[in-house]
Amino acid sequence: MSGSDKKVGRTAFDFELESLAGGALPLSRFAGRPMLIVNTASKCGFTPQYAGLEALWRQYNDQGLVVLGVPSNDFANQEPGTSGEIAAFCQGNYSVDFPMAAKAHVRGRDAHPLFRWLAVEGGFLARPRWNFYKYAIGRDGRLKGWFSTLTTPASPRLTRRVEAIVAERGPER
């Protein structure tokens, strides 16, 4: 990891991904809003978690929550599709309406800087070891917790964390 990956004061809002629809997706556009960032895949045994993520998005979006899916093919070739195929799959099978980034690496030397930052902030065990790792980001852009693949979007632990980050006061401006 280079020294530029971890800067004092850096937050999730300092990163930019590419949108699944094309073009830049700066996370700064969500500044002041709580986020749940999830590395996703379309051909995984955990893919049905898309339904739970969409349910969280619909339940808490009016309170500011942003669910952000980041497709990744890093685990057992479970996201081989193009952006168009991924979008069609998510919309057609799970009516996904939350923002989706373009496919990105989430682990290893080629990991997107956002996921390198999440690994540093959350510690060694926070590095995604499979699809559907979930990262709760507070309104201040700081990591407030992470959850492994086995923690479903409907789990009480995750729901409590989402309710806590939604209830936070935003950063003073």
Image (cartoon, grey):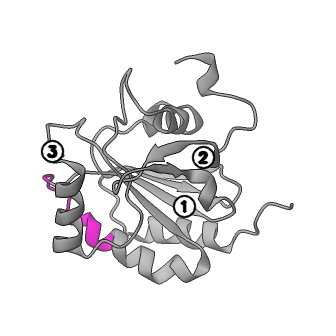
| Callout 1 crowding tier (Cα within 10 Å): few <14, some 14–19, many ≥20 | many
Q: Where 102 falls versus 119 (above or below)?
A: below
Q: Secondary structure at mark 1?
A: strand
Range drawn in magenta: 43-52
Mark 2 vs 1: CB contact within 8 A? yes
In x, y percent, where is residue 67? Answer: 45, 64
Q: Which residue is mark 1?
A: 35
Q: Which residue is mark 3?
A: 78
Whether residue 154 is visible, yes or no, is: no
Whether residue 20 is visible, yes or no, is: yes
In x, y percent, where is residue 166? Answer: 62, 72
Q: Earlier in the sequence, mark 1 or mark 3?
A: 1
> Looking at numbered disc 3 in the image, what kind of residue is underneath it?
Gln
Residue under the point 34% across and 57% down: 21
Q: CA distance from mark 2 to mark 3?
A: 26 Å
> Looking at numbered disc 1 in the image, what kind of residue is underneath it?
Met
In magenta stretch: residue 99: no
Residue under the point 46% across and 37% down: 115
Q: Nearer the viewer, residue 63 or 155?
A: 63
Q: Nearer the viewer, residue 94 or 158?
A: 94
